[in-house]
Amino acid sequence: MALIKDWRLILSIILAHVLLYMTFSDRDIFWYLYTAANLFFISFAIISEKIDDKQKTRSYLKYGVLSGLLLYALFFAGHLLLPILPFSLEKEVASIYRWYSPQFSWHYIVLILVFIPGEELFWRGFIQKRLSIYFNDLTAIIAASVLYASIFLYSDKFIWVLAAFIAGLFWGSLYVWKRSVPMLIISHLVFDVLLIVLLPLF
């Protein structure tokens, strides 16, 4: 199967898991190692694939902002359901905010300039794009979302894995629709700023 011979794709997934395993091994160094991981993601994606940008600036800004607001609204609605769901998911969300929220000014800088671009360039702009060579768009979206979510298994937080999978499906679908990585970065930026900085759920 041609997919198995795609060494860049296979190697990148393995390295992503190694990096995220190390990143979540110690909360005290999370911000340092996740910064390094996303710098790797950015470099690998740029070297390996042409970055799609098939939208004009006004278009990707508009759809980026609106989609980011929509995804936040979906997560906010989901947050309202947490108290009635099993498995102490509400406590998991609270612990993620407590342990991983930005604390210093440089955290906010790398969140905006490194984390967000790194995730979109790598998981949608490289991984999903590469998978779309071998599968149809729907399968590529689902597979890329599963892979994206899988790296958060090392956090030991099921809700983080679930959230990443849902966000992956959302941004993956947006990518197929508009073929614009800059739009995804804007969408992710709006979502993260609301979720983490302006209107956190906890």
Image: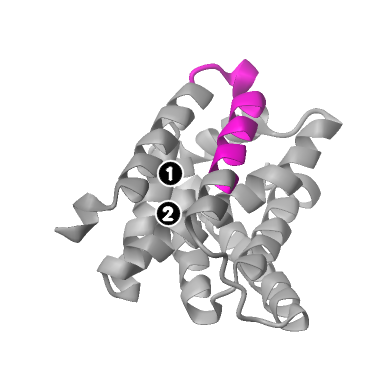
Q: Which residues are magenta?
A: 24-42
Is 159 or 100 nearer to us in this picture? 100
> Disc 1 vs disc 2: Cβ atoms closer than 8 Å?
yes
Is 107 or 42 nearer to us in this picture? 42
Q: Point out the image quarter for the N terminus.
A: bottom left
Q: Name which quarter of the figure residue 110 lies in.
A: top right
Name the dominant secondary structure of the magenta segment. Answer: helix
Q: Pointer 1: what residue?
A: 161
Residue 163 % position (x, y): 49, 50
Q: Around disc 1, counting alpha carbons within 10 Å, would you say few (fewer than 14), some (14 to 19), or many (20 or more)?
A: many
Residue closest to the far front: 47
| Residue appearing at x 57%, y 65% in the figure | 51
Spatial separation of the CA atoms under disc 1 and disc 2: 6 Å
**113 left or right of 50 in image:** right
| Residue appearing at x 56%, y 50% in the figure | 119
Indicate the amino acid at tag 1: Val
Q: Pointer 2: what residue?
A: 165
**56 left or right of 1 in image:** right
Residue closest to the far left: 1
Q: Is residue 21 above or below residue 69?
A: above
Q: Is residue 177 above or below residue 193?
A: below
Q: Secondary structure at mark 1?
A: helix
Residue 132 % position (x, y): 34, 69
Indicate the amino acid at tag 2: Phe
